[in-house]
Image (cartoon, grey):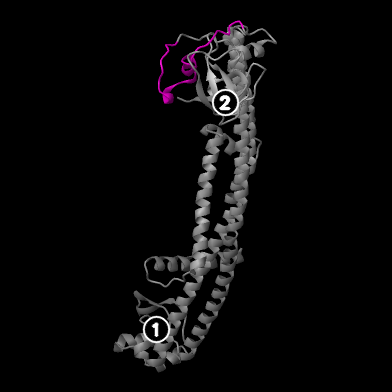
């Protein structure tokens, strides 16, 4: 217990010395050891890396989980070192509601059938989203968290130690400077009357002499009473009369030149030790800061993996929606209305309106018997009113022989026939002809 108290007192003294040094530096009353420019640039790059990593991490979490309550719940489970329970994605929940609605409204009705097909697509989208969140969390979020909670905490700890070593070094420099100044003053002005401190110890005889003669004691009197030189701060009582005493305070006695030399030597030794510790800690901190380059390389690899997972996710969503569009496009146009034959601007033309305003040819309402659709379409001639050119926006794979496969960016000739679904057109490319979806085309004037 005694040892712990001594250590506590020593630590308190060191803390107080550092606090005084730091305060004096802030007010410009003490010199500060400056780090070299390369070291300062390493510190700035490390701080910038930490700040931007935190921002990217937080925003990626928002992207993967927009619900703040769910993010707080996941954070608490992570801190408690417990497994996060499985949570239904928004797409899967929407699929569940659509399936229940179709079951209640009638699965055999056109609306019910469409609800079921859309629900299946939304369920696949939700599963793809779940896989994307899981992959992105492992490949991207986890490395960022590991840096902030591991490497950065180590860097911060070593930087705090370096700051303490620098304060100790500057305090040692200040002590050496003061000791040398006092030594020079004692050497140049040896007269006690000029060099003695303002507060000094008075013995009983010296006190009586001072009280009686109102003069300070001579150097011989001081040497006779205290041949050892300096003494520790003390308080003592000098009796004045039987009913009154006077408390006198003091700090120390003046030292001779030899004792000042000892003080200078001691201060120089402390400075050498402080300089060695500062240099060692600066080297350790420098190595950690230079490791930020490796952190950037690791984060770059994780970023590539995040982009790959995001690309896979969006590609899956695109395929699922294409399949859904094909399924819905083959349904008869139950809700097709009449559209006036106007020619709006291309930028404001919707696919349905564009299909309705295409040049009309012979009807194909009776050209749908199985096995004969492709043959009958080949026999259909373009309408007398003319055709239009269209640019293909996306690749399209024909679902059957009545459809025309498309490649992105190619130009084809399109026209509409009476009785066709407004979401479809007849497309021609060379000697090939077939139905094409309007949503895959950009109609040209």
Q: Nearer the viewer, residue 89 or 118?
A: 118
Residue that carries the numbered disc 1 in the rendered image: 202
Q: Position of residue 278 (x, y in %)?
A: 55, 71
Q: Which mark is residue 234?
A: none
Look at the numbered disc 2 and give the secondary structure of its residue. Answer: helix
Q: Secondary structure at mark 1?
A: loop
**Could you tell me which residue is drawn at 61 percent across and 43 percent down?**
140
Q: Nearer the viewer, residue 172 or 208?
A: 172
Does 84 sit left or right of 425 as displayed? Answer: right
**Quadrant location of residue 125?**
top right
For this view, does 330 lie left or right of residue 350?
right
Dividing the image into 4 quarters, which one contains the C terminus? Answer: top left
Q: Is residue 416 above or below residue 173?
A: above
Expressed as whole percent of the image width and height from the top left, the position of residue 408 reads 58, 30
- For residue 364, which quarter of the picture? top right
Q: Label 1, label 2: how many angstroms apart (C-alpha)? A: 88 Å
Query: Residue drawn 62% across and 46% down?
Result: 302
Magenta residue span: 339-366
Residue 365 inside the magenta-drawn segment: yes
156 vs 133, nearest the viewer:
133
Q: Is residue 230 above or below residue 172?
A: below
- The residue tagged 2 is 90
Picture coordinates of residue 13, whole percent (x, y): 50, 68
* One can see residue 254 in this view: no
């Amino acid at each position: 217990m005694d040892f712990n108290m001594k250590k506590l007192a020593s630590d308190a003294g060191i803390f107080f010395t550092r606090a005084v040094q730091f305060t004096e530096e802030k007010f410009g009353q003490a010199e500060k050891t400056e780090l070299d420019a390369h070291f300062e640039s390493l510190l700035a790059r490390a701080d910038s890396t930490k700040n931007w990593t935190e921002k990217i991490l937080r925003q990626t979490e928002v992207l993967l989980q927009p619900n703040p309550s769910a993010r707080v719940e996941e954070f608490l489970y992570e801190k408690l070192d417990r497994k996060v329970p499985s949570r239904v994605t928004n797409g899967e929940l929407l699929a569940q509601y659509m399936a229940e609605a179709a079951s209640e409204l009638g699965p055999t009705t056109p609306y019910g059938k469409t609800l079921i097909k859309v629900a299946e697509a939304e369920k696949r989208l939700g599963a793809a989203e779940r896989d994307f969140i899981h992959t992105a969390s492992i490949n991207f979020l986890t490395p960022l968290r590991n840096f902030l909670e591991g490497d950065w905490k180590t860097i911060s700890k070593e930087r705090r130690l370096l700051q303490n070593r620098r304060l100790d070094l500057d305090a040692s420099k200040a002590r050496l400077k003061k000791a040398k100044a006092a030594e020079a003053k004692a050497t140049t002005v040896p007269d006690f009357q000029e060099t003695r401190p303002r507060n000094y110890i008075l013995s009983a005889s010296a006190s009586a002499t001072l009280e009686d003669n109102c003069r300070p004691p001579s150097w011989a009197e001081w040497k006779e009473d205290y041949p050892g030189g300096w003494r520790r701060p003390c308080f003592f009582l000098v009796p004045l009369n039987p009913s009154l005493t006077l408390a006198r305070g003091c700090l120390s006695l003046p030292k001779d030149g030899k004792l000042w030399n000892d003080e200078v030597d001691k201060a120089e030794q402390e400075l050498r030790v402080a300089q060695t510790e500062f240099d060692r800690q600066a080297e350790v901190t420098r190595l950690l800061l230079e490791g930020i380059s490796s952190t950037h390389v690791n984060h770059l690899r994780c970023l590539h993996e995040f982009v790959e997972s995001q690309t896979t996710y969006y590609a899956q969503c695109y395929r699922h929606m294409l399949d859904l569009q094909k399924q819905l496009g083959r349904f008869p146009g139950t809700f097709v209305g009449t559209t006036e034959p106007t020619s709006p601007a291309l930028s404001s033309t919707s696919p349905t309106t564009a299909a309705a305003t295409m040049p009309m040819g012979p009807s194909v309402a009776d050209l749908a018997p199985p096995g004969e659709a492709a043959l009958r379409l080949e026999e259909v001639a373009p309408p007398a009113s003319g055709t239009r050119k269209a640019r293909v926006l996306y690749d399209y794979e024909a679902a059957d022989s009545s459809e025309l496969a498309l490649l992105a960016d190619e130009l084809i000739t399109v026209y509409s026939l009476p009785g066709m679904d407004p979401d479809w057109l007849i497309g021609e490319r060379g000697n090939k002809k077939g139905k094409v979806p309007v949503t895959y085309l950009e109609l040209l004037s």
